Image (cartoon, rainbow, N blue to C red):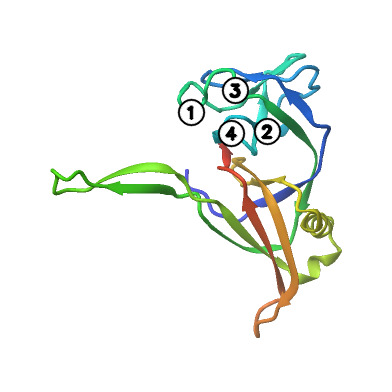
Amino acid sequence: MASVPTGTTFYVASALGTVKTVTGISNAAEAVVTAPSHGYSAGDTVLLNSGWGRINQRAFRVKSPTTDTFVLEGQDTTVVGFYPTGSGGGTVQKATTFTQITQVVGVSGSGGDPKNVTYKYMENDVEGSINDGFSATSSTLEMDADSISTPGYAAVKSLTETQTVTIIKTLMRSGAQVLRAGTVALNEDPVLTDGQIAKVKLSINGTGRVTRYAS
């Protein structure tokens, strides 16, 4: 069923837990991460740093945890050309606190589109095109300037100062989630337009592709 933006809420991981070592990630339809004594629970959101570039600095949900392993929900790593066996290790951190960014009045985004390389063989009169990854993602949230006293404003202001990679979660009214790893930058200078409320802009610069869940 179609959905509308009304009811969408935004959250920022204002605190990340202890860095855990990832000793390996399997090649599977849903990748299994080995992180000894990770302590995570099903449904936790984690920030992954991996030797596999396609999932490096991306956010995922935890599924089917055991003492030393957990599944990256929905992440397929079966293609060894992209995910060379034995080289996916790195680190992982749990988002321990999500703080809601309230009083959002507008959202815009760009990037994430496929990048194409065009080529032509001398013997052909028609060009070909192949995919070469995706462009960098970015989003802008327009917030009521008077939200300055809210916890969300304080959280993104602090993260702007540190430029720490964090997780931004978008929760739609349908229950669908979008997870984006990246940095945030809050411009506290109010935008003043006659006939409109005063607004400030929060820029979100992604470090990888978003991860989307249906519910």
Closer mark to the observer between disc 4 and disc 3: 3
- In the rendered image, is residue 25 in sight? yes
Residue beneath the point at 59% across and 22% down: 87
N-term mark: 1 or 3: 1
Residue 23 position in % (x across, y down): 70, 19
Label 4, label 3: how far apart the Cα atoms are: 12 Å
Which quadrant would residue 63 be assigned to in this image?
top right
Q: Nearer the viewer, mark 1 or mark 2?
A: 1
Does dot 3 land on a helix, a strand or a loop? loop
Q: Which residue is mark 1?
A: 82
Label 2: which secondary element: strand
Q: Which residue is mark 3?
A: 87
Structural distance between the alpha carbons of marks 1 and 2: 17 Å
| Numbered tag placed on residue 55 in the rendering | 4
Task: Identify whether 101 is placed above or below 86.
Answer: below
Between 3 and 98, the one lying in front of the other is: 98
List x then y, in percent, for residue 4: 54, 53
- Secondary structure under tag 1 reads loop
